[in-house]
Amino acid sequence: MRLTDAQIAQFRDDGFLILPALFSPAEVAVLKAELPRLFAERRPENFREKKGDAVRTAMALHLRSDVYARLVRHPRLVGPARQLLGGALYIQQVKVNAKEAFSGDVWQWHYDFATHHGEDGVPEPLALNLHVLLDEVNEFNGPIVFIRGSHRRGAAPATLDTETTSYPLWTVDDATVAGLVAEGGLVAAKGPPGTVLIFGDTLVHGSSINMTPWPRTIFSLILNPVANALTRHQRPDHQHHRDLSPVEPLGDGCLLAEAAP
Ligand SMILES: O=C(O)CCC(=O)C(=O)O
């Protein structure tokens, strides 16, 4: 899978790409079938919502599931990342972010590099966040909202918020968000299951609560150049993996290969 020149130009301009239905319904079904078992596990990699017991984010899935071990090497994710970044990339973080029906909580306005730099000492904002929507995401069930062009501002001021949700996050203040929104506007990252989102490390984004009857789960893979690796190890491995082996893509049919009889 290769991005077109127009898609690369759009990524550079907007700071993100939305690629509808890149994974098939059969592939998404294989990915979703793993989640009940993974979410049921009581372990530090599963962060639960502040209120209630629902899983908010489940990490290190490629080390907990053969299916996700193949997804992190999928050419439809690794191919575009290599095109945009070049060179050797390591698997920095792997998770599924869930928003359960009626209760999925907010992700405050933030950009990922604030955490990658502030917590892990990553030198430059080069990492890419590659998402696969595992449910239909619409305007109602808590889509990720991007501030178009906000990546161009670079690293905005950020402060660590340990109160709002169960997951500590370096967040951007309201005045900065207002200015960025006035300049670039907002885009809700909606689409059918299998849609891929790609966004960079300084793009400001967030999502509101899910007050609908429709659960929303999204897979996220962060790939970072080996040459730009973490320099601090204060967070656990599942939040920023220490294995800097360059990721090598598998074949395009890798998700369905083992599912076949
Ligand atoms: O799942 C969400 O709504 C937000 C996820 C997010 O902000 C991230 O992966 O950086």
Image (cartoon, grey):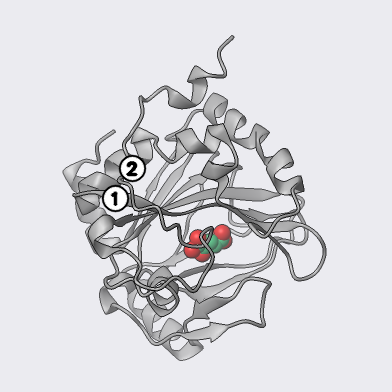
Left or right placement of residue 236 versus residue 7 in this view:
right
Residue at point 48%, 18% (across, down) = 257
Q: Is residue 183 above or below residue 8?
A: below
Q: If you read the primary sequence from the N terminus, does the residue marked by circle 2 or circle 1 appear first?
A: 1
Contact between labelled residues 1 and 2, with CB atoms less than 8 Å apart: yes
Q: Please, what is the three-letter code of the amino acid marked with disc 2?
A: Val
Q: Is mark 1 within 8 Å of ligand 1?
A: no
Residue 216, how many percent across, how many down?
65, 50
Q: Is residue 111 among what the camera can see?
A: no
Quarter of the image with the C terminus is top right
Left or right placement of residue 157 versus residue 1 in this view:
right
- The answer to which quarter of the image holds residue 252 is top left
Left or right placement of residue 6 versus residue 35 in this view:
left
Residue receiving disc 2:
247
- As drawn, which residue projects farthest toward the top? 261
Q: Is residue 69 above or below residue 257?
A: below
- Mark 2 falls on what kind of element? loop
- As drawn, which residue projects farthest toward the right? 52
Query: Mark 2 Cα within 10 Å, few/some/many (few <14, many 20+)?
Result: some
Q: Is residue 147 above or below residue 54?
A: below
- Mark 1 falls on what kind of element? strand
Q: Please, what is the three-letter code of the amino acid marked with disc 1?
A: Leu
Residue receiving disc 1:
89
